[in-house]
Image: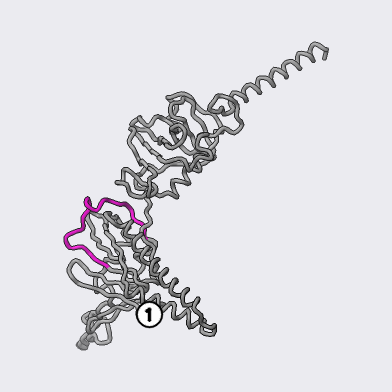
Amino acid sequence: MNQKTLIGLAVAALFAIVIAIVVNHANRPQSEAGGEKETAYLVPALKDHVNDVDKVVITGAESKPVATLTRGANGWSIAEKNGFAADTGKLREFLLKLADAKLVEQKTSSKEKYAALGVEDVADKDAKSVEIELGGLQKPVKVIIGNANQHGGTFVRRAGEAESWLASGSFSVDKKTDSWLRKDLTDIAATRIASIDITRPDGKTVRLAKAAEGDANFKLADVPKGREAGSDYAINGPASTLGGLKFDDALPAKDAPPAEKPLKARFATFDGLIVDVTAWDKDGKDYAQFSASEDEKTASAHVDATLAKAKSDEATKPADAKAETSAAKERDAKLAALKKEADDLNARFKDWTFVLPAYKYAAINKAPDDFLKPLEDKNAAKKGGVDAKMPAAKKPAKPG
């Protein structure tokens, strides 16, 4: 191999390296200002400024709003749900993922190919994309969120720009308004409940109660003569209604008033909290309205009993004025905490009708017979039991 050939190969190799560098350079994500940046963020303005966001507008196909979330004096709310509270935990998680998203790889700039990535304009009738608009930053931000990539990441496009990208992270957006509601309603453990009174639309009533705090099972009151109480499982069932209760949807109470004769249930706790439920079913959905209050007499007695027990447990310690003052403060604090709990619940309940999960409604939609052992069918017992008549004996056959 002569010298000219070696020089030619070296030049070709150098040219190939230069081409590779140029291609790599062209494919790198660019910053907002157009300069190079090894790790360009999808939304640079959001990085370290998540807490500055005061409005999030989620828009779907045909430019129809999915949810308009705004931050006010009482926290985040949803305009499309008449100002009901938004799920701030879910919203914050989404914003943090969006803030951390980095541009990984440039994709198509062809409008005709946007739909394959799910980054088409939301004005399109059949758009699968979702547009996110953020307020509260130095400049408003709009980002179109597309499909998830099967190998990780999400296809995105900044609104108004032709280029689409593969961004790091998975941050799909719920396209149902009610998915952004704060749905936790109550979380009152069954062990805390002392009694449950159910009044059915036909006027029939059921009372379930525990004799003492700490009892394992509720007892059915007023068992009819000749009947027996049912299983512990059946009798304990309604006590789980208020535990981990999440609603499916929320409607203004004026737009969803109770039925003429609704089902009513009252839950009373050992420490004096009362929750009243008015429930009914309509068009295949189960609705309920709630209110909370305090039984001051029960609350005071419970606090006094709790403090008395604590005092007896420390009977060996000498009494002093400081201990008496501390006990009085603790009593006031416990009563104040109960009042705050009732007030907080009413702040959630007031002026709203909630759509309940079917199994929660079924837990209180019980008739008296549901808590009793079934009656034995005496006729069936006679037919199939020891008292059943023996079949008549066959006549002996005549001799041939």
Q: Quadrant of residue 126?
A: top left
Residue 33 drawn at (x, y percent): 54, 25
Residue at figure coordinates x 70%, y 17% from the top left: 15
Mark 1 surroundings within 10 Å by alpha-carbon count, few (fewer than 14), some (14 through 19), many (20 or more): few
Left or right: 30 as drawn, with respect to 74: right
In the displayed structure, 16 sits above or below 55; it is above
Residue 285 seen: yes
**What colour scheme does the image use?**
one colour
Residue 174 drawn at (x, y percent): 40, 43
In the displayed structure, 70 sits above or below 260; it is above
Identify the amino acid type marked 1.
Ala
Q: Which residues make up the magenta segment?
A: 245-265
Residue 150 seen: no
Q: Residue furthest right?
A: 2
Residue at figure coordinates x 32%, y 43% from the top left: 79
Residue at figure coordinates x 23%, y 64% from the top left: 263
Residue at figure coordinates x 44%, y 48% from the top left: 90
Residue 83 drawn at (x, y percent): 32, 47
Q: Quadrant of residue 345?
A: bottom left
Asked which secondary structure carries label 1, the reply is: loop
Q: Which residue is mark 1?
A: 212
Q: Quadrant of the N terminus?
A: top right
Left or right: 338 as drawn, with respect to 386: right
